[in-house]
Amino acid sequence: MRKVCKEEPNLGLQLINIGYGNVVSASRVISIVSPESAPIKRIVTVARDNNKLVDATYGRRTRAVIITDSDHVVLSAVQPETVGQRVLSHEEMADES
């Protein structure tokens, strides 16, 4: 089995670190939001009921909710601003290549 590494230049896959060694594909991310509002809590509940929730918090407090284009919802223990900056920095690196 081939190990996929985010440093492979021709892979075409931009991976974003969402904390504790977990990554998501940058091209699949639609939004990164804070989990406090009632509508976002409802989205998380619906995703859990539909088996589309990925909990990447390792038991820590959820600080960011990442919504993907496949209707999966990813919970992260990293602040939404931090994840957003990581997405932007990956886009800047891709532009330079």
Image (cartoon, rainbow, N blue to C red):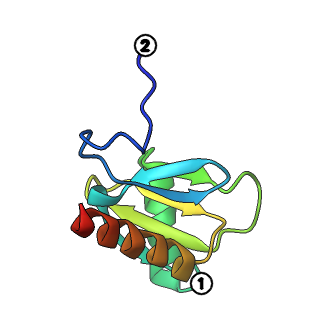
User: What amino acid is at disc 1?
Assistant: Glu
Name the residue: 41% across, 19% down: 2
- Residue lying at the far bottom in this picture: please name it: 37
The total of numbered circles placed on residues is 2
Q: Which quadrant would residue 30 be assigned to in this image? A: bottom left
Q: Position of residue 59 (x, y in %)?
A: 76, 55
Q: Nearer the viewer, residue 25 or 32?
A: 25
Q: Position of residue 76 (x, y in %)?
A: 59, 63
How far apart are the alpha carbons under marks 1 and 2? 40 Å
- Residue lying at the far top in this picture: please name it: 1
Question: Left of 96 or right of it: where is 84?
Answer: right
Mark 1 vs mark 2: which is more N-terminal? 2
User: What amino acid is at disc 2?
Assistant: Met
Question: Left of 83 or right of it: where is 76?
Answer: right
Q: Which quadrant would residue 31 be assigned to in this image? A: bottom left
Q: Is residue 49 visible?
A: no
- Residue lying at the far front in this picture: please name it: 96
Question: Left of 66 or right of it: where is 8?
Answer: left
Q: Secondary structure at mark 2?
A: loop
Instruction: Please identify, in this view, whether the residue under mark 1 or under mark 2 is nearer the observer.
Output: 2
Q: Residues within 10 Å of mark 2 (few under 14, many from 20)?
A: few
Q: Which residue is mark 1?
A: 36
Q: Position of residue 61 (x, y in %)?
A: 74, 68
Q: Nearer the viewer, residue 15 or 33?
A: 15
Q: Secondary structure at mark 1?
A: loop
Name the residue: 56% across, 61% down: 75
Q: Which residue is mark 2?
A: 1
Q: Is residue 67 visible?
A: yes
Q: Residues within 10 Å of mark 1 (few under 14, many from 20)?
A: few
Q: Quadrant of the N terminus?
A: top left
